[in-house]
Image: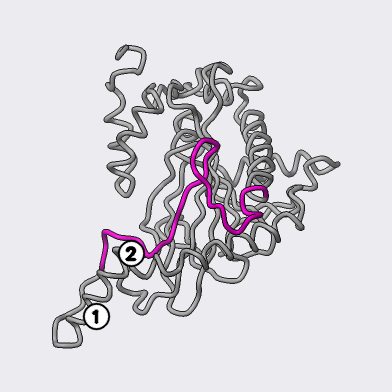
Amino acid sequence: MAIPVIDFSKFDGKERAEVLAQIANYCEEWGFFQLVNHGIPVELLERVKKVSSECYKLREEGFKNSVPVQMMNKMLEEEAVGSKAQRLNDVDWEDVFTLQDDNRWPSNPPEFKETMMEFRRELKKLAEKIIEIMEVNLGLEKGHIKKAFTCDSEYEPLFGTKVSHYPPCPRPELVPGLRAHTDAGGVILLFQDDKVSGLQVLKDGHWFDVQPLADAIVINTGDQIEAVSNGKYKSAWHRILAKRDDNRRSIASFYNPCYRAIIGPAPSLQNDGELYPEFVFGDYMNVYQKEKFGEKEPRFAKVKKAEKFGDKE
C-alpha cells in the first residue's frame, strides 16, 4: 500500500473541493500524505539537495566518531571473539543538526544559509496554507489554529528545520535509523531523499514505506493538531530504517506553537466531550524531550495538571 499522493496544483482550480476532501481523509486515516506540484520551485529543491549533501560531506568524519558508531564498532569487535550481538535500541544511526532563525548555521558551503533561508520561507508559507485547509475541513473559524499557535498573534510560531543524513550502516538490523515516535508539534513538512527509502509510517498495526517521490513534500500531523482537533486528526507513528549501502537525506521542518501557546480541543469539536486536556505547549515539550519515543497518551496526561507558564512568574 502506497502513502497517498495529492497534486496540490489542483487546489487553485476546479478540483479544489476534491483536494480539500483528500486532505481531510488522509489527515483522518493516515496522518501522512505527499504533495506534488506544491508551488516550491524545482530549481530551489535542487539547490537544497546540493548544499545539504555538500554540508554532510564536511560532517562525515565527525559522524564516524559519534556514539552510535563507537557502540556498533565495539559490539562488532566483541561479536568477532564470540559474543552475541545485541540490538542497539536506545540510539539512532543519524547525523543531524537543526536550523532556527536564532541559532548558528553552517558557514560552508557558502551558499548553504541563503539557500536554506529561501527554502524555509517557502515551506512556512506552505505550512500555513495546509493549516488553513485543516481549519476549513474541521469547520473551525478561519485563523483558529494559527491564533492558538501564536497566542493570538502575540508571538511567532516556532519554525525549525532538522537536516539529517542516515549514512550506510554495516549491520542495519542491529540499530534503528530513527526510533519510532510521533512528532510533538503542529504540521511537519519533509523533503526526503528521492532515491533512498527508509521512512515508514504505522497504520492499522502495519508499517508502510513512504515511497521516495521526486520533488514531493511529505506532510504529517503532530501531537498538537491531534489535540486541537480533539482526536479527529491523529499524529502518526513513524520510524526510519538504517540501510547497509545507502546514505539517505531527510530535511524536516516543523511548524509548531510558540512555547506559551495554550493548546486544547477547539470548542466546536467537543460534541463527544473534551478528549484532550488544555495545556501549555512549553510544558508539553518539557515532557516530550524526556519521553519522545514513548506512547503519547501518558504525555498528554502529564501536562493535564501542569503548571502554566503564567503561573510561574
Task: Give the residue at x 36% y 13%.
Answer: 310
> Distance of mark 2 from mark 1, alpha carbons?
16 Å
Residue 107 colored magenta? yes
Which residue carries the number 1 mark?
Answer: 76
Which residue carries the number 2 mark?
Answer: 66
| The C terminus sits in image quarter | top left
Type of residue at label 1? Leu
**For residue 217, above or below residue 267:** below
Label 2 or label 1, whichever comes before in sequence order = 2
Q: Is residue 10 left or right of residue 288?
A: right
Q: Is residue 201 left or right of residue 296?
A: right
Task: Give the residue at x 44% y 20%.
Answer: 262
What x and y, as percent, mark residue 201?
47, 57
What x and y, as percent, mark residue 185?
46, 37
- Quadrant in the picture for residue 264: top left
Q: Is residue 251 left or right of residue 204?
A: right
- Quadrant in the picture for residue 255: top right
Q: What secondary structure do most residues of the magenta stretch adopt?
A: loop
Type of residue at label 2? Ser
Q: Which span of residues is magenta-colored?
A: 88-114
Residue nearer the viewer, 242 or 75: 75
Task: Give the residue at x 50% y 75%.
Answer: 246
What x and y, as percent, mark residue 61?
42, 69
Residue nearer the viewer, 82 or 102: 102
